[in-house]
Image: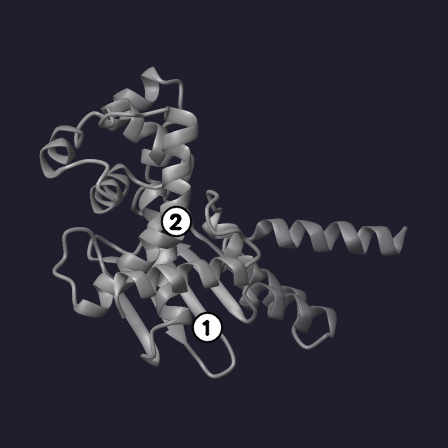
Amino acid sequence: MSKFDLSMEANYIRKKLGEDTSSPIDVFACTNRIDNLTVIFNELGENISGLTHKGKKSSIIAINSAMTLGRQHFSMAHELYHLFIDETLGTIVCSGINAETSDNEKKADSFAASFLMPKDGVYDFIKNHLGCNNRLKAEDVVKLEQYFQVSHSAMLIRLKELDFINQRELNSFSDNAINQAVQLNYSQDLYKITGKKETYGYHIALARDLYEKNRISYGRLKEIMLDAGRTDVLEQICLLEEDVVV
């Protein structure tokens, strides 16, 4: 598939998930709209950014939370390529930053860039919010990455791909993104490692359904939810059962 084809696929998947083809997208929230998908956030070490397992009845996406939030957003979009477009079955493990990548992984990266930073959206933001007639400045890159919620490096690569900056500018803009963000009064969360350890989606819904049908005990449900970092589900169940008693 060409980059144009991947861009079209990204737009199609965005619309399939209820989004338009140019606005910033909450990629984590989008996964809640995918049937039979379990999403796991956990620390996966330095050599894995994420993985996708496509099963017959359900699928799993795991994201390495030992990376920055911006990087995790890109990893999730990357994994959506493997889920929806990649014809490989079974488990696909994706390497971490600076790893040597296959052609298929490069396609997944290209898809992710178009999914998170659609061409029309980047053009519109630059025209309507930055009003740039000349080349972009370093602070403009930070404004763009904050708008689209991607890492500094992902935004730089996308801007070069769309001919808004050249290689020399990319190199000169590579440092001090956090300092620039602070000066522009943005949150630093995008550049921080979350270390999140939680599970969402199909696995959680299935466990809760089995409990409500008396197929598993509360003790087993508690074990599953604690392993998944979802004490909030246990709290919800307790509140519901208290209401029933009352």
The residue lying at 90 percent from left, 50 percent from top is: 246
> Dot 2 surroundings within 10 Å: few (below 14), some, or many (20 or more)?
many
- Residue 141 relative to residue 204: left or right: left
Number of marks present in the image shown:
2
On the question of residue 117 being in view, the answer is no
Q: Residue furthest left?
A: 168
Depth check, mark 2 against mark 1: the one in front is 2
- Residue 190 relative to residue 245: left or right: left
> Dot 1 surroundings within 10 Å: few (below 14), some, or many (20 or more)?
many
Pointer 2: what residue? 116
Residue sitting nearer the eye, 85 or 197: 85
- Relative to 122, residue 51 above or below: below
The residue lying at 43 percent from left, 51 percent from top is: 197
Q: Residue furthest front?
A: 133
Q: Secondary structure at mark 1?
A: strand
Q: Residue 223, percent across and down?
A: 55, 62
Residue sitting nearer the eye, 110 or 132: 132
- Relative to 210, residue 14 above or below: above
On the question of residue 78 being in view, the answer is yes
The colouring scheme, among rainbow, by chain, secondary structure or one colour, is one colour
The residue lying at 33 percent from left, 59 percent from top is: 111
Of the numbered discs 2 and 1, the one sitting upstream in the chain is: 1
Quarter of the figure with residue 207: bottom right
Residue sitting nearer the eye, 240 or 37: 37
Q: Residue 43, percent across and down?
A: 32, 52
Pointer 1: what residue? 59
- Residue 64 relative to residue 161: left or right: right
